[in-house]
Image (tube, helix red, strand yellow):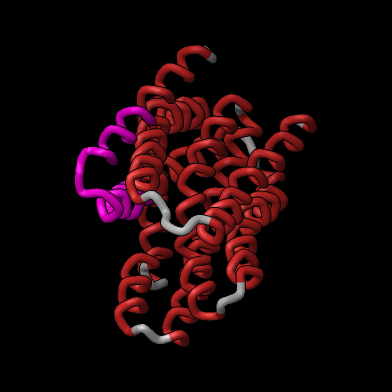
Amino acid sequence: MGNNVTVAVLLTLIAGMATALGGIISLFTKQTKKKFLSASLGFSSGVMIYISFVEMFPKAHDYLAQSFGILRGSWAACASFFIGILIIMAIDNLIPSPESSLTAAKAEHQEAALKRMGVLTAVAICIHNLPEGLATFTSTLDDVNLGITMASAIAIHNIPEGIVTSVPIFYATGSKRKAFGISLISGITEPFGAIVGYLIMRPFLGSTAYGIIFAAIAGMMIYISVQELIPMAREYDKGNTMIFGFIAGMAIIAVSLMMFM
């Protein structure tokens, strides 16, 4: 368990720092390749949806069946899945959408509006990164291979989040340091949320807790994929780039999961 904790911290840190990487990319490229972003978001959503339904939810069901029996365990898994969706939906509705806010800010052509948009986006991403960090951390504690897969998927979609966070700050202030700083802070919340969540829940971790957490996280990832990643990918490219990335993400994860069986 001790070694797994160390690996979990490192994987969560890497996934979170991908947000800062996105901030760097946005500051040193003249024009972000929209098709690349679309494919990356599609890839990430494919990974997250596939792993949620094929790996995490069945694993949650098995854990809860051990604790409550097959019938009650099935109900507990389903309830946890939809509770996870409701939690992330509530978080999503409490904060402004980064994409819609960015569009509005650009339309206004005001530095103050751009700066405010960047801060709001950073807050949104910080909140969204907390459950993602906990997902990567707890998955790694249970199964390092699953944790690596989770961290990879989250890191991929954190890169565009870093871009969305840093661009408005850079255009509003002209400061690369401030723009990078806010994307860095957004990324740090991922390992922070993981470590704090682990310390709080450590005494309760067992088959029941893992089952509830995995089912809830599966629900959260499905919501994030359908509500945020896929629509954002479509915004960057209206063609088939997103769906190709989506299929590739599912295919690669399917193969990797079979290789580790």
**Residue at image x 61%, y 64%?**
180
Seen at 50% across and 55% down, the residue is 29
Q: Is residue 245 magenta?
A: yes
* Image: 236 above or below 77: below
Is 189 positioned to the left or the right of 256 in the image? right
Q: Is residue 72 visible?
A: no
Query: In the picture shown, does residue 193 fall above or below 68?
Result: below
Q: Nearer the viewer, residue 202 or 192?
A: 192
Q: Nearer the viewer, residue 171 or 127?
A: 171
**At 27% from the left edge and 39% from the top edge, which residue is drawn?**
241
Q: Could you tell me which quadrant the N terminus lies in?
A: top right
Q: Residue 98 appears at what percent x and percent y?
A: 39, 67
Magenta span: helix, strand or loop, mainly? Answer: helix
Query: Which contiguous range is marked in magenta?
Result: 224-249
Residue 172 located left or right of residue 54: right
Towards the viewer: 206 or 18: 18
Residue that protrudes farthest toward the right in the picture: 2
Q: Nearer the viewer, residue 63 or 12?
A: 12
Examine the image and state in which quarter residue 4 appears. top right
Instruction: Count the labels in the image.
Output: 0
Q: Is residue 221 visible?
A: yes
Residue 243 in the image: state x and y as whole percent: 26, 36
Q: Name the spot of residue 77 as percent of width and height, x first.
A: 40, 37
Looking at the picture, how far across and down is residue 13, in whole percent? 67, 46
Q: Residue furthest front?
A: 30
Q: Residue at x 32, y 35 (%)?
A: 246
